[in-house]
Image (cartoon, grey):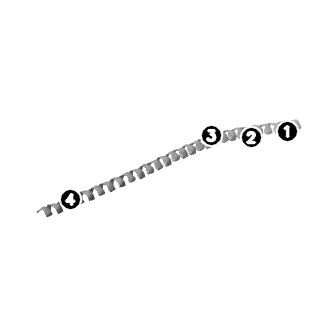
Amino acid sequence: GAADGAARKAARLEEAVSGAEERCRSLQALLQEARAEAAARRDAVAAAESKCREGQEAAAAACADARSLETRLRGAVEETEAAAAAAAASLAEREASRHAAA
């Protein structure tokens, strides 16, 4: 009787141990999956940060180009206004000398 009871107890313990081992393996698998996912997310974040930096650099370059274009345009406008003023003065001078001649 006692031997039977001990054998049954041993069998139950063995079952419990085997169940615990199985749960442990499944938890380890889950942990590995979670680690892989975390690594993938880290890579994705790093890629996004790198793209963001590239975007910021491109935006800074575009701003610099725009400022340089604005400077060139302002210079061209000033030259055009000076030329127009000179032409108007020259025209006025010719008008005046024509009136004087007439």
- Asked whether 13 or 85 is in front, the reply is 85
Q: Are marks 3 and 1 in contact (CB under 8 Å)?
A: no
As drawn, the residue found furthest toward the right would be: 2
Q: Are marks 4 and 1 in contact (CB under 8 Å)?
A: no
User: Disc 4 to disc 2, how far (Cα)?
Assistant: 104 Å
What secondary structure is found at the residue carrying circle 1?
helix
User: Disc 4 to disc 1, how far (Cα)?
Assistant: 126 Å
N-terminal of the pair, mark 3 or mark 1, is 1
Q: Name the amino acid type tagged 1.
A: Gly
Could you say which quadrant of the image residue 19 lies in? Answer: top right
Q: Quadrant of the C terminus?
A: bottom left
Q: Which residue is mark 3?
A: 36
Residue ID at (27%, 59%): 85
User: Disc 2 to disc 1, how far (Cα)?
Assistant: 22 Å
What secondary structure is found at the residue carrying circle 2?
helix
Q: Name the amino acid type tagged 3.
A: Ala
Q: Which residue is mark 2?
A: 20
Q: Which residue is mark 1?
A: 5
Q: Quadrant of the N terminus?
A: top right
Q: Name the amino acid type tagged 2.
A: Ala
Residue 73 falls left or right of residue 19: left
Q: Which residue is mark 4?
A: 91
* Residue 48, percent from left and from top: 53, 45
N-terminal of the pair, mark 2 or mark 3, is 2
* Residue 68, percent from left and from top: 41, 50
User: Disc 3 to disc 1, how far (Cα)?
Assistant: 46 Å
Residue ID at (24%, 60%): 89
User: Disc 2 to disc 3, how far (Cα)?
Assistant: 24 Å
Residue ID at (79%, 39%): 12
Mark nearer the viewer, 2 or 3: 3
Mark nearer the viewer, 4 or 2: 4
What secondary structure is found at the residue carrying circle 4?
helix
